[in-house]
Image (spheres, rainbow, N blue to C red):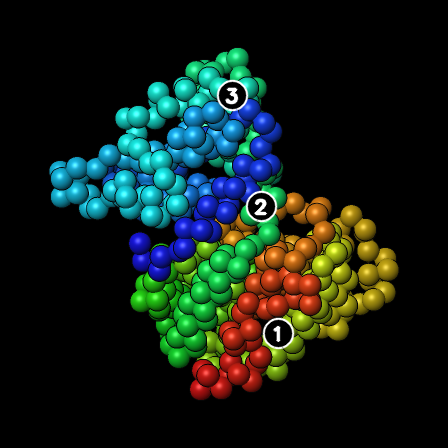
Amino acid sequence: MRYHKIDNQFFTANRKNFSKMMVSSSIALFVSNDEYPRNGDQFFPFRQSSDLFYLSGIDQEKSFLMLAPDCPNPKLREVLFILKTNEQMTIWNGHKYTLDEARETSGIENVYWLDDMDMMIREAASYAKNIYLNAYEYPKYKTEVETGEQRFIKEIRQLFPLHIFERSAPILYALRMIKSETEIDLLKQACEITNKAFRRTLQFVKPGVMEFEVQAEIEHEFTRNRASGHGYYPIIASGKNACTLHYTENDKECMDGDVLLFDFGAEYANYSADMSRSIPVNGKFTDRQKTVYQAVLRTLNTLTENMVVGASLDELDKLSKKLIEKELIGLGLFTAEEVKNQDPKEPLYKKYFMHGVNHHMGLDVHDVGERHVSLAAGMVLTCEPGIYIPEENLGIRLENDILITENGPFNLMENIPIEIEEIEKLMG
């Protein structure tokens, strides 16, 4: 792995916390992500299931975890099953975990090859009434591709039709929503790599460069700093492209006089940063660009101040709309009188600001979390207001990653340039 070794006590603690929340006489089963085919005999780069990684630290395909905390056979209470490696596999595909390496990585003593899995799961299940199965339950997620988790669920339900099945997701979501010190440190490293990459682009961007060249500079810095890559596909959007929220073509020329909007974040040890910045292609903002930029920055700062213990995402969302509406009036995009007479179902601000400003983050860039749960210490969320003016070919979004603490919000991206003067100075 590119990232530095993580103390296995982190994964051990996660398993203990999960086990405490299981009902008695239960087992829980977790499966790694698939290797997804790209074309021919090629695969996309493997990315481990966030939940399996959270509970084991195992970063390899064809891995399974079983937890059976009150099983009468102590050797079955925590069991990891991994792919059996051999010399031929090593020659063709590289090193895979040995049993000892998997023990050291995960903190699990009972590690076996996959050949032993069927019998051991059957034995553990014979002592249990309930089986916890895991699935990704993000409400907006939908895919036509059947995942390894979905196939595994079908197999287990068919194998044990008389057991009671429980969902692992509610337990994992509650646990993963509050970050431990280890997770905060990993997120800080992801943010610092992102910082280095952004600073590199400030020295590189100028009129005439292509968006994909800027992306290449980011990826160079990611690689040399041990990131596995992007936490999500990057947005490098110049000029009018910045008004397309999920613009990812990144294939246009950066023109003199335009603003370049970035939305990218390094993934380190499977933990992702998420940053947005907007910079002048020629190194100097125009007066109009500065005015719009400062409107977004004021909104960002006010929203961040309100990200405190006890606040709700719904409250922050309402506040963001109120703040942006006021700024848009100040920018002359519509008047207060027009706001009074607007259709409440289609408010005027939506033409220039049409997205939310907060989401949880961690092992997934849109991390698990309940929107209707009040903010609590240990949560990490983004804050990302924006203003998009298509008729001016101008889109500005600013985004930081915020740790919620008992003493108020802490900006994990405090070292990443955001003030106009600093950006212009670094570009000069």
The local secondary structure at tag 1 comes to: helix
Locate residue 319 relative to residue 382 in the image: left or right. Answer: right
Q: Quadrant of residue 171?
A: top right
- Kind of residue at badge 2: Leu
The location of residue 327, given as percent across then percent down, is: 73, 70
- Work out how far the residue at label 2 is from the one at label 3, CA to CA, in angstroms: 24 Å
Say few, some or many: other residues with alpha carbon within 10 Å of mark 3 (under 14 / 14 to 19 / 20 or more).
some
- Which mark is nearer the camera, 2 or 3? 3
The location of residue 292, given as percent across then percent down, is: 64, 73
Residue at 60 percent across and 63 percent down: it is: 402
The quarter of the rendered structure image containing the C terminus is bottom left
- Kind of residue at badge 3: Ala
Nearer the observer, 362 or 131? 131
The answer to whether mark 2 and mark 3 are in CB contact below 8 A is: no
Say few, some or many: other residues with alpha carbon within 10 Å of mark 1 (under 14 / 14 to 19 / 20 or more).
many
Earlier along the polypeptide chain: callout 1 or callout 3? Answer: 3
Can residue 94 be seen in the rendering of this structure?
yes
Judge whether 172 appears above or below 279 on screen. Answer: above
The quarter of the rendered structure image containing the N terminus is bottom left
* Residue at mark 3: 128
The local secondary structure at tag 3 comes to: loop
Say few, some or many: other residues with alpha carbon within 10 Å of mark 2 (under 14 / 14 to 19 / 20 or more).
some
- Which mark is nearer the camera, 1 or 2? 2
- Work out how far the residue at label 1 is from the one at label 3, CA to CA, in angstroms: 59 Å
Locate residue 13 relative to residue 388 in the image: left or right. Answer: left
